[in-house]
Amino acid sequence: MSQEEEISGETNPARAPHALTIIFAVIGMLLTGFGIYWAVSQPDLRYIPSLNREDFTVLESKVDTDGNFVHSVRIRPKFINLSGKPGFIDKVEFVPQSIATLPEIKVTSIDKERIFWHQEKQIEITF
């Protein structure tokens, strides 16, 4: 074998990549994918329609100076998180189910407890 052949590498067979190179490349791709998922994904919180009688409590009822009834009510609906990223309920909106006149509803407090993956949790809402 001449010195020119050794330098050009024509007679050397192709070498396979080292095992550690492959392992680190796969770990790097997995960590990158997980990081992108964690940065971009949102919690998937869903309401579970199972409001029992003990989940609905009237805290206070009174009449204001204009003669209107004012009620302070607490409900404890259940929610589940279907995403891998934890989240919490930070906004509640009451939507009318009929065309009847609705009273004014003002939310006074919401429990902001974290709900983790596939965890069912009751969240206390006072209005």
Image (cartoon, grey):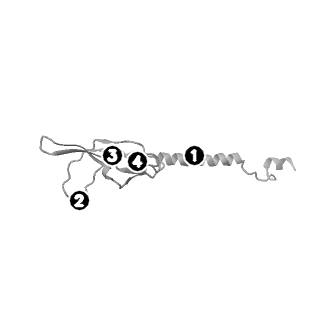
Q: Pointer 3: what residue? A: 91
Q: Residue at x 80, y 51 (%)?
A: 12
Tell me the tag on residue 31: 1
Q: Distance between the residues labelled 2 and 4?
A: 29 Å
Lower sequence index among marks 2 and 3: 3
Q: Name which quarter of the figure residue 124 lies in.
A: top left
Tell me the tag on residue 18: none
Lower sequence index among marks 2 and 4: 2
Q: Which residue is drawn at 20% across and 50% down?
A: 103
Residue 92 position, x and y percent, is 31, 48
- Taking 122 as reference, is 60 left or right? left
Residue 35 position, x and y percent, is 53, 45
Q: How far apart are marks 4 and 1 (CA)?
A: 30 Å
Lower sequence index among marks 1 and 2: 1
Q: Distance between the residues labelled 1 and 2?
A: 50 Å
- The amino acid type, in three-letter code, at marker 4 is Lys
Q: Do the residues labelled 1 and 2 touch (CB within 8 Å)?
A: no
- The amino acid type, in three-letter code, at marker 1 is Leu
Q: Pointer 2: what residue? A: 98
Q: Nearer the viewer, residue 41 or 123?
A: 123
Residue 39 position, x and y percent, is 48, 45
Tell me the tag on residue 121: 4
Which residue occupies the extreme bottom position in the image? 98
Q: Do the residues labelled 2 and 4 touch (CB within 8 Å)?
A: no
Secondary element type, mark 1: helix
Q: Residues within 10 Å of mark 1 (few under 14, many from 20)?
A: few
Secondary element type, mark 4: strand
Q: Which of 61 and 126 is in front in this view?
A: 61
